[in-house]
Image: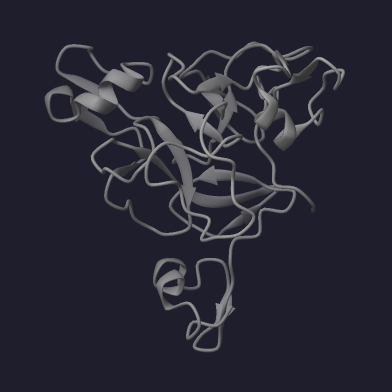
Amino acid sequence: MRPSSDQALFSIFGINFGGSPPTKFNIPNLNGRVAIGGQQVGMFGQGTLTMTWLISTGASTVAPLPGTLAMFGGNYAPDGWALCDGSQLPISQNVPLFEAIGCAFGGNNVSVFELPNLMSGAAPVGAGQGPGRTPVTLGQQLAGAIPGLGINYLISTAGPYPPGSGTGAFPKTGQYLGQVIAYAGAQVPAGWALCDGALLQIAGNEMLFQLIGTSYGGDGQSNFALPDLRGLMVTGLGG
């Protein structure tokens, strides 16, 4: 991409992901790669790309629900977000976020709680036990070639149908139907469901079925399945 044609994006990315300013800068390439946390944003590893992982604090009226995790191509936390760096926060000053995630990642449950920590090259892993997979609990630290941290993956079962074009931004209120997020809370908020492979009846969920069909299972006649991300890391398509 050309910095002159998208100065706002260039101001965030710079050449974290490559390029030759002032004529060109690259966007992240996650084809076949897992987004891990770390300080060297843009570094490629074996099947990985280092990104900045953020958690929504609920301090902004336009950010997603508190406890939502999102990858980011910049080196800082925008308004309404915090770095997933294991920081200890005072409960009294961060009530919405504490109510969402509690002390799943540390803290004393009285005065302080801790944020998820993905800064050591870790990636979110879906909590729960998928078929043939090792069980994972929320907040569990996992060793491996790519370290992991147990997080809930949710899919939106309510909200407007996603547009075919636009800015790619989160809706200012609510969420798009079929949107999948990493979520650091234990309780599933209204309008969301766990990405646990559950079968839903088509009747009553027609719009969601129209969106995802039987990509994840189901007979396509009376039911369809949600994605099952329990015990898995999310990998970009392609590669």
Q: Is residue 109 left or right of residue 174?
A: left
Q: Residue at x 47, y 42 (%)?
A: 70
Nearer the observer, 239 or 188: 188
Residue 235 on image: x %, y %: 69, 41
> Does any portion of residue 117 appear in the rendered image?
no
Please, is residue 201 above or below residue 70 in the view? above
Residue 171 on image: x %, y %: 44, 46
Q: Residue at x 44, y 41 (%)?
A: 119
Please, is residue 232 above or below residue 129 in the view? below
> Does any portion of residue 87 appear in the rendered image?
yes
Residue 10 on image: x %, y %: 45, 74
Colour mode of the rendering: one colour
Q: Is residue 239 left or right of residue 104?
A: right
Nearer the observer, 108 or 144: 108
Q: Residue at x 34, y 31 (%)?
A: 66
The image quadrant where one finds the N terminus is bottom right
Nearer the observer, 74 or 80: 80
Residue 233 on image: x %, y %: 65, 32
Nearer the observer, 142 or 226: 226
Please, is residue 94 above or below residue 107 in the view? below
Please, is residue 6 above or below residue 186 in the view? below
Q: Is residue 94 left or right of residue 132?
A: left
Q: How many marks?
A: 0
Q: Residue at x 64, y 11 (%)?
A: 135
